[in-house]
Image (cartoon, grey):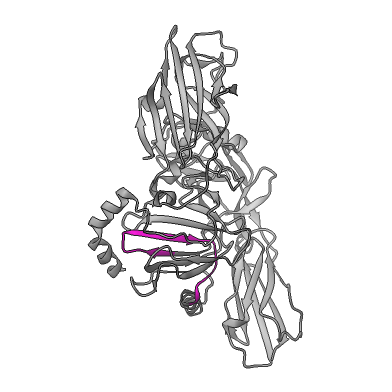
Amino acid sequence: MKKLFAFLLLFTTIVGVSQEKYPQDAFRSPVDIPLVLAGTFGELRSNHFHSGIDIKTQQREGLPIYAIADGSVTRIKVSHWGYGKVLYIAHPNGYTSVYGHLQKFGPKIQEYVKKLQYKKKSYEVEDFPDYAEIKVEKGEIIAYGGNTGGSSGPHLHFEIRSSISEKPTNPLLYGFDVRDATNPTLQKLYGFPLSEDAQINQSKNATALNFKRQKDGTFLADPVNAVGTVGFGFVGFDRQDLAANHNGVYSVQQLVNGKVYTDYDLESFSFGETRYINTLIDYYHYGKYRQRIQLLYKSPGNKLSIYNTVENEGKIDIREGLSYNVELLIKDYAGNLTKAIIPVEGKKELIKVDKDEKKTENYVIAKKPNNYDLGAAKVYFPANTFYDDFYIDLKKDDDTVRIHNSTVAAHRNFTITFDVSKYSEAERKQMFIARLDSRLRPSHASTYKRGNTFTTRTRNMGTYTLAKDTVAPRIKAKNFKEKQWLNNYHYLSLRITDDLSGIDTYSATLNGKWILMEYEPKTATLTYNFDDVILDQKECKLEVTVTDNVGNTNTLTHTFYRK
């Protein structure tokens, strides 16, 4: 790594120039098929911005992935979730390219990774090769497209980052050709009363606005009557010509009487700020309806650096008797534009819908730490866990506590500590903290056990309880049977499942030697490739052991034959 840092410092001047100009001819495409996107840079995801583009791989795995330029592999990671199998390549011009959800790596990288996995006796590995230890050339096959990690279908997650700051930038800035003559789609418009005296169309709550498409293609909202400080937001998406995917938009502008009040784009962002996406949307609406309203004003706690211009935090002070023309300009990277006009009249009216605010006995001051004793458990919120102050709804019932609901976002981890002193040591071994979903189904929350307490750290509001798992994981052979001849088989496949706390660890041996089993959680499948180890025995004894998150263990033993 020291060699890499020295190399990067040597090119600091070059980096500064190249990142300003975004070189248009330095990189080739990572695939040899037309670029069709399933996801765009900066797209709004759960608690984060999408840090790359998702390239469709024709609904199949195994598509060759190429190095976009000469460079050196600086990071390799194999994990069950996240990017799955992912590769990082540093290039001499100061950029790093990232390739995620891979099926497998190219031959020399695959050999490097396999040696590491067998050395550590682990499928999940992460390594940072020294600069120039694994060189690649532009156009070299470095991997094959797949569906590993937290992927919902075969595709290539592709990024370009600064090698020094590690900030991701929009890959389309570098001249990659994506066919796009399609305007972004506007689905909904909303108005938000923001001050105590504010109202919109006789309401003090967020209000949906009616609008229609005009002959010139723009959208015109019905006249809005309002007073006080208000803000606006929209629901929309972008798509390219060759895909039906609802992708994110590139840039947004809000003008008030011709003056720019809000201007932001998704050219780049830092990973340290990505969770502030929760302040870019109306999180209450998202938590309730799973729909993201992008706000045209800055809400409390918003520290995003994506803004080019912000006047009065994007908020509009509406005065009685005055008229306002609010324009919304939504663009994609290709420059296709969707425009909406919202005419606003400063007019105070009789309130028909009062402010919808549920008050409880507990009020959270976001900038201060907050402690609550709920009997069965104690909850501790560090200072700045939340973006804004609010009334928090807390409930307790025996071994269950409810901590508000999904309409409030937590920026930092908070702790929940259960008292388990009434349970025996034997009972505690099989117990864990579980989060209950809307159907009261439990899911394992990482549980730290110490003395008479169980503690979990989380950013998820909701209902938590103590659960007990007494059943060991299940293991079942999928493509072979006991004492079967497997001469023409290329791999072994097994299914592993757990009914409650979930799979924690797994391991396998063949004739007493550790073997690499690839685990795919999405299909609950363990796979062993016969190419990994040359068998010198006709009779083979396979032993697979799986342990769940509370320590319940099961072992499957199978004998098979192979020449």
As drawn, the residue found furthest toward the top would be 321
Q: Is residue 405 magenta?
A: no
Closer to us: 178 or 424:
178
Reply above or below: 74 against 231. Answer: below
Closer to us: 354 or 171:
171
Q: How many marks?
A: 0
Could you say where residue 156 lies in the image, as x and y percent from the top left?
53, 59
Which quarter of the picture shows residue 183? Answer: top right
Closer to us: 40 or 333:
333
Could you say where residue 417 lies in the image, as x and y percent from the top left?
52, 49
Quadrant where the N terminus is found in the figure? bottom left
Which quarter of the picture shows residue 262? Answer: top left
Q: Please indicate, yes or no, whether residue 473 appears anywhere in the rendered image.
A: no
Could you say where residue 310 lies in the image, as x and y percent from the top left?
36, 30
Q: Is residue 98 magenta?
A: yes
- Relative placement, left or right, of 9 versus 378 is left
Q: Please indicate, yes or no, whether residue 335 appears anywhere in the rendered image.
A: yes
> What is the chief secondary structure element of the magenta stretch?
strand
Could you say where residue 41 lies in the image, as x and y percent from the top left?
47, 47
Q: Which span is picked out in magenta?
A: 88-107
Quadrant where the C terminus is found in the figure? bottom right
Which quarter of the picture shows residue 561? Answer: bottom right
Closer to us: 243 or 562:
243
